[in-house]
Image (cartoon, rainbow, N blue to C red):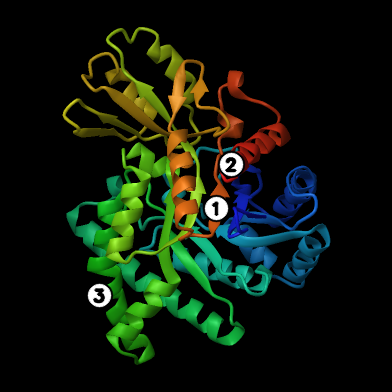
Amino acid sequence: MRVGPANEFHLTYCTNIHPGEEWPEVASTLKQHLPGLKAQVSPDAPFGVGLRLSNRAAVTLLEGDRLSRFHDWLQSEGLYVFTLNGFPYGSFHGTRVKDDVYAPDWRSEKRAAYTRLLARILARLLPDGLTGSISTSPLSYKPWLDAETQETAFRRGSYHLAEMAETLAQIEAETGTHLHVDLEPEPDCLIENTAESIAFFQEWLWPVGGSHLANQLGVSQDEAESLLQRHVQLCYDTCHFAVEYEEPETVFDRLSTAGVPIGKIQLSAALRVSLPEDRSALTDQLQPFAEDTYLHQVVERHNDGSLNRFRDLPDALPHLAETDAEEWRIHYHVPIYSDAYDGLHSTRGDIGRTLAALQEDPFCPHLEIETYTWDVLPASLKEDLPTSLQREYDWILSNLD
């Protein structure tokens, strides 16, 4: 749906919150949830959809006339797809996900082939005149890599992304449809913060990927780098950067100065925990969030500003009593309509600051609510899904007024 003072933004929620790895399941849940939510949030105007498809669902959707029939259904319901979540390749519900969410990574042709499928789908679904975005994983997961394999991941990832840019440029030449793939930095990934984002674009993607693309297309290095800047961008997730203790305004300024374009913004909040001297109750408060499905990386900050990291909340909890840190931030996408959870808090303020910055300078038109933890939230925080989604939209819209 179009929102903002001049309707300059497209707002949606990511359908990764709905179970379904096969296309029939996905289609069923979309038909169950989307029309009702549209009637509540955007009854008189088209309603945007942030579509998540596994690789299996994408393959099936492209068979026969399924994609045309899905397109027709969207139009009949007043729905439109402008962004896809291409981060999780495989299962995302009802099973242990943890670090499997990063596999296959951008070293693999499987990741590239999956993203090409998504591009074909989005090119067909995207309304005329709009630009489409596909968020994707930030190359790989650091604990899988040593120094040598990190360099391989940067190089092979740059090659695969350059080839992806070639595919997207061809789609644009044939159809006039502009699509971009947006790398989504995340804690403990090969690209997890602003400095690493800038370093990848400036030291790997543009020079190394650009050289590969120039050879592929028979164009100059400058022309190849221009194609990469147009078709490979960044996805800014407010939760992920908050876990890294990075301020939105500073991130946006640094990326802009470096020439790194932001193609998509995901609106989500992390758990924020101040660490008092008496922490006897904190372990019990945090234990319900230490669940077995998703990774919940923890970054603690000390009084001198230094950071220390834990791969997952269950790994961090045994250190809670002994650490001299002043704060923990936890990669757990908590509901954004509240900033207090049974005595804990969130980084929701960063979402408000992001929306304020966008209203000063609308540098990115794609906004996606990305609270995906509804199934694994502690029982005391759970509401029925339609009510929860309505409250998410209400909060965002009230801050875009």
Quarter-wise, where is residue 337 in the image? Answer: top right
Q: Position of residue 221 (x, y in %)?
A: 28, 84
- Name which residue lies at 45% across and 68% down: 112
Position of 157 with respect to 117 (left or right) is left
Mark 2: which secondary structure?
helix
Whether label 1 touches label 2, CB < 8 Å = yes
**Badge 3: how crowded within 10 Å, few (<14), some, or many (20+)?**
some
Q: Quadrant of the C terminus?
A: top right
Identified at 23% across, 15% down, the residue is 322
| Residue at the outermost left position | 304
Residue situated furthest right in the rendering: 76
Q: Amino acid at mark 1?
A: Leu
The local secondary structure at tag 3 comes to: helix
Give the numbered dot on residue 207.
3
What amino acid is labelled 2 in the image? Ile
Q: Which residue is mark 2?
A: 396
Whether residue 176 is visible, yes or no, is: yes
Residue 376: image x %, image y %? Answer: 56, 30
Q: Nearer the viewer, mark 3 or mark 2?
A: 2
- Say above or below: 96 vs 39: above
- Decide which of tag 1 and tag 3 comes sooner along the chain: 3
Dot placed on the residue nearer the N-terminal end, 3 or 2: 3
Q: Report helix, strand or loop for mark 1.
A: strand
Q: Which tag, 1 or 2, sits closer to the chain's start?
A: 1
Q: Is residue 271 left or right of residue 277?
A: right
Which residue corresponds to the image point at 62% horizontal and 58% vertical from the top-left? 7
Q: Is residue 236 above or below residue 319?
A: below
Q: Give residue 367's mark.
A: 1
Q: Dot 2: within a 10 Å radius of its alpha carbon, few (fewer than 14), some, or many (20 or more) residues?
A: some
